[in-house]
Amino acid sequence: MDIITIHGLRKTFGKGESAVKALDGIDLAIEKGKFTAVIGVSGSGKTTLLNMIGGLDTPDEGEILVDGVNLAGLSEKELAVFRRKQVGFVYQNFNLIPTLTVRENILFPLSLAGEAFDRAFFDEISGLLGLKQRLHAYPHELSGGGRQRVAIARALLAKPSVVLADEPTGNLDSKSSQNVLGLLKLSVETYGQTLVMITHNLEIVQMADRVVRIGDGRIQAQGET
Ligand SMILES: Nc1ncnc2c1ncn2[C@@H]1O[C@H](COP(=O)(O)OP(=O)(O)OP(=O)(O)O)[C@@H](O)[C@H]1O
Ligand SMILES: [Mg+2]
């Protein structure tokens, strides 16, 4: 079953001579519970595509359905709820808040929305990601891999159906990359989540179930690994 379906997606940034066609007609289906790697050269449109799946940006043309919901049909308010509940984001530079502890960072999105969190699940994912002993530490006290594990715990806490990761190991050495990736993969498998990850790392591409190559805003190739 496909959890994400995309038809005829187009997006141009800027106008006139400085216009850039970031997405130029993308059709794509992503199967539920699978790990899809998105690859392609810099500027090919990968981040633009991921941001649209996550409801952070809107297309000029085309349709995105996530878990049966057409994103174009959602109001700003509904889109904010969609981003909070359905999608977990993980970024290259972790995006942690330096003045908050590990625990506070993980809880931040839900506490900002005034929502309760599942205490048992918090304990479970902080254990799974090896953060139990570091919950009162601050981000600068952790290694890069540790910071990314915090960001992953934060992304998973709302039990999203889709996890979107934009070069999550881009700032990590190869040993931490393998470690973080292994944990991310284990987490999404444990909770039956769908993982879509942009990466330039070939070892990671090999861990994916499917690979989609983007070039000039179009799908150039896709297939099993
Ligand atoms: N907000 C924006 N305003 C203007 N141009 C943009 C914007 N976002 C993306 N672009 C342009 O759209 C094209 C696709 O960008 P995108 O960030 O999706 O590429 P990418 O494949 O993620 O590249 P990278 O591997 O470097 O992260 C690029 O030419 C980029 O400069
Ligand atoms: Mg990018």
Image: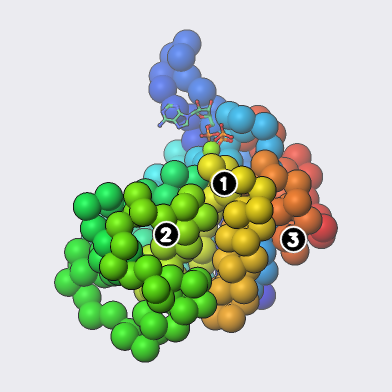
Q: Which mark lies nearer to you, 3 or 1?
A: 1
Q: Earlier in the sequence, mark 1 or mark 2?
A: 2
Q: Above or below — where is 19 with respect to 200? A: above
Q: Above or below — where is 51 with respect to 184? A: above
Residues at marks 2 and 3, CA–CA distance in whole angstroms: 20 Å
Q: Are marks 3 and 1 in contact (CB under 8 Å)?
A: no
Residues at marks 1 and 2, CA–CA distance in whole angstroms: 14 Å
Q: Which mark lies nearer to you, 1 or 2?
A: 1
User: What's under tag 2, amino acid-wise?
Assistant: Ala
- Residue 20 seen by the camera: yes
Instruction: Kindly identify which residue carries mark 1.
Output: 172
**Where is residue 37 drawn, in percent x and y?**
67, 53
- Using the rendered view, name the quadrant where residue 214 is placed: top right
- Residue 81 seen by the camera: no
Q: Are marks 2 and 3 in contact (CB under 8 Å)?
A: no
Disc 1 secondary structure class: loop
Q: Point out which mark residue 207 bears.
A: 3
Crowd tier of the residue under label 2, counting other residues whose Cα lies within 10 Å: few below 14, some 14–19, many 20 or above: many
Q: Residue pushed farthest top?
A: 17
Mark 3 sits near ligand 1, with its Cβ under 8 Å away: no
Q: Residue at x 31, y 62 (%)?
A: 137
Q: Residue pushed farthest left?
A: 114
Q: Residue at x 27, y 62 (%)?
A: 101
Crowd tier of the residue under label 1, counting other residues whose Cα lies within 10 Å: few below 14, some 14–19, many 20 or above: some
**Where is residue 22 drawn, in percent x and y?**
54, 32
Q: Residue at x 37, y 80 (%)?
A: 122
Q: Residue pushed farthest bottom?
A: 120
Disc 3 secondary structure class: helix
Instruction: Kindly identify which residue carries mark 2.
Output: 151
